[in-house]
Image: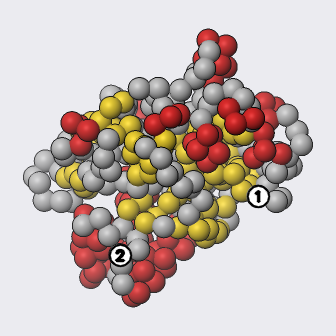
Amino acid sequence: MKAVILLAKPGSSFHFGDYAPFGETFLDNTTTFTHSDTLFSALVNIHNQVWPEDTNAFIEQFSKGKIMLSSAMFCFRGKKKSLFFLPRPAMMKIESDTDLKELKHIEWVSTGVWEKGMISGQQGEKPLTAAKRFSCLESEWSLLSGDDPALLTAYEMNPVSRVKIHSRTREDTLYQQTNITLCGSPDVNVCYYFLAEYDELDTAAKDRLETVISLLPDTGLGGQRTTGCGFFEGIEWHENPLPDVMDDSYNVNLGILSPVRELQNCLAYRVMTRGGRRTETGQLKKILMIREGGLMNDKPRGQIADLSMEGNGSFLRYGMPVSWPVSKRVINL
């Protein structure tokens, strides 16, 4: 398994579509990172531009589990080391009410916290809170910066007013679009990364997948790219940065999951709505998917869901993500 860092300059803006109950307000909503289904769609679209005759075979490699993706998660890049964050598991153990007050807003945990837990002082290290939403160990932060981690701003949500140029009427031409802007500091560069598991592919298929991934900075990721959103400087390949978990563990999905039989093994999870938008061919189906960070007894498989009303596979939603174990001793179940 490889980690792919999407290198971005401070001030880079993105718009990652999120479900909105009213079509008129969908641009008001953006997630802070791109989910694995959006990443899948981006790679399929790139493949279709380069090798259109083989796109169905490319999709089949995903449906067979020969290629698995995580969501694009956060990475803090320092001068000496990169710090990789994972979605906080649904029920991580917290020691006291004081910790609960401090840590209830945490959405992302470092690989060190994933391995050792969020309990204060466990194994001699107190987890730090960085940029309000991130938790890491003191030893991890010290390799990035000597500044107070609480003072770091990882990202900002910025509403932007825009005007529709090509409109038949003057009514409703003004609209609001919300973007996420990556920030950081002189010591810390905030980027995204995702995990790609494709060890079962043959050499030719691996080369083709890596070529498609390498083209992501040229095509961009997410929506509203005509307004300057979604572009990266380049990519950087890393070996799998996730910690080995040797003791008794649960499995955690690192991308959104479309369950088939997995619900009977799900212990704690949150759901989200995907699909439902109106297209030129009609309304898409809406489905519930399990958010990143769900806790499960077994490794989930999931499915690629067909959202088209006709069932012709014209609109697919990827729900077979990378999962990774987390030790039961750091989980509050």
Classify mark 2: helix, strand or loop. Answer: loop
Would you say residue 155 is visible in this rendering? yes
Question: Which percent across, then down, holds residue 257?
Answer: 32, 46
Dot 1 crowding, Cα within 10 Å, few <14, some 14–19, many 20+: some
Residue 46: give its label: none
Residue 81: give its label: 1
Q: Residue at x 68, y 32 (%)?
A: 122
Q: Residue at x 49, y 79 (%)?
A: 211
Question: Which percent across, then down, holds residue 92?
Answer: 51, 30
- Compared with 48, 262 (above or below) is above
Dot 2 crowding, Cα within 10 Å, few <14, some 14–19, many 20+: few
Question: Which percent across, then down, holds residue 218?
Answer: 56, 70
Q: Residue at x 45, y 83 (%)?
A: 207
**Amino acid under label 1?**
Lys
> As drawn, which residue projects farthest toward the right?
146
Q: Is residue 309 left or right of residue 271?
A: left
**Amino acid under label 2?**
Glu
Question: Which percent across, then down, holds residue 16?
Answer: 49, 45
Q: Is residue 69 left or right of residue 238?
A: left
Q: How many marks?
A: 2
- Compared with 160, 6 (above or below) is below
Classify mark 1: helix, strand or loop. Answer: loop
- Compared with 96, 258 (above or below) is below
Q: Which residue is mark 2?
A: 200
Closer to us: 295 or 49: 295
Q: Quadrant of the C terminus?
A: top left
Closer to us: 38 or 299: 299
Q: Residue at x 28, y 80 (%)?
A: 54
Could you tell which of marks 2 and 1 lies nearer the N-terminus? Answer: 1
Would you say residue 38 is visible in this rendering? no
